Image (spheres, rainbow, N blue to C red):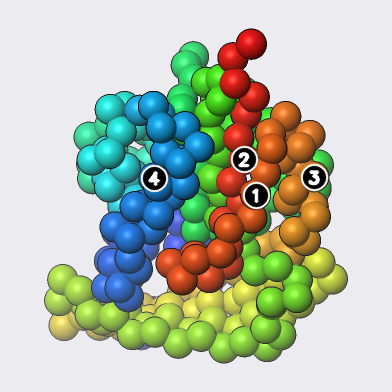
Amino acid sequence: MTTDRNESIYDRGEMYEAFYRGRGKDYTGEAALVTSLIRDRLPEADSLLDVACGSGDHLSRFAESFGRVEGLDLSEDMVQLARKNTGVPIHRGDMRDFALDRTFGAVVSLFSGVAYCADVDELTATLCSFARHLSPGGVIVIEPFWLPEDFLEGYVGTDTVESGGRTYVRVSHSVRDGGVSHMEVHYLVASAESGVTHFSDVHRTTLFTREEYESAFVRAGCEVEYVKDPLAPRGLFVGTAAPAA
């Protein structure tokens, strides 16, 4: 067995894609839910930007419902994979401070991407970046990480997925470090050709409160709602920008 330490899953795009598809993540249902939340607030919305778009699996579903879709991600590996998977414009950029030359009816960020903001100032900067890219009356939808009261201290997660002749095993352990979730993840990747490879990854995601999320939306100039749904067990924050004067 070969071992690599501290190599991010976000720099292993093909493995990320194989694992979450094999794990059964409902990209289609989640995209449909987000689309309905957007259209309930802005029926004419026909353009969407997916921030922290990852491998593009949500984005490819959004492309079926919106006339123009684009993505943005910090990882170059994810940018390349999303371009291959979707065939739509994918930009490399930091969600806290990016600038595209156009606006969208909706800006979304799913799978707890915004929780990688280190503090409230970064969260506010991120939502302000999103709001700058909204058309009048546009909608922001974000999926948070767990709220502090819902976080399970010491949680251990285990998953095994088989895909493309490989077996992927993921084991995680999460503890609270102040206002942050510290999750250590270990991966085993096994195949007949290459044997077994191991690497580990650490994710530090901020346990923002509901009030901190909502205040950041307000500072970005949006009205905000918190929505719960079986397809979104962490909930979704939905912000709406002011309509045209």
Disc nearer the start of the sequence (2/3): 3
Residues at marks 2 and 3, CA–CA distance in whole angstroms: 11 Å
User: Do residues under tags 1 and 4 come within 8 Å of each other at their CB atoms?
Assistant: no
Could you tell me the amino acid type at mark 4? Thr
Q: Is residue 227 above or below residue 80?
A: below
Could you tell me the amino acid type at mark 2? Gly
Under tag 4, what secondary structure? helix
Disc nearer the start of the sequence (1/2): 1
User: Do residues under tags 1 and 2 come within 8 Å of each other at their CB atoms?
Assistant: yes
Could you tell me the amino acid type at mark 1? Glu
Residues at marks 1 and 4, CA–CA distance in whole angstroms: 15 Å
Disc nearer the start of the sequence (4/2): 4
Q: Which residue is mark 4?
A: 35
Under tag 3, what secondary structure? helix
Residue 54 position within the rendered picture, expressed as x and y whole percent measured from the top left: 41, 50
When asked about the image quadrant of residue 28, the answer is: bottom left
Q: Residue at x 64, y 55 (%)?
A: 226
Q: Which residue is mark 3?
A: 215
Could you tell me the amino acid type at mark 3? Ser
Q: Which residue is mark 2?
A: 239
Res. 225 mark: 1
User: Do residues under tags 4 and 3 come within 8 Å of each other at their CB atoms?
Assistant: no
Label 3 crowd (10 A; few <14 / some 14-19 / many >=20): some
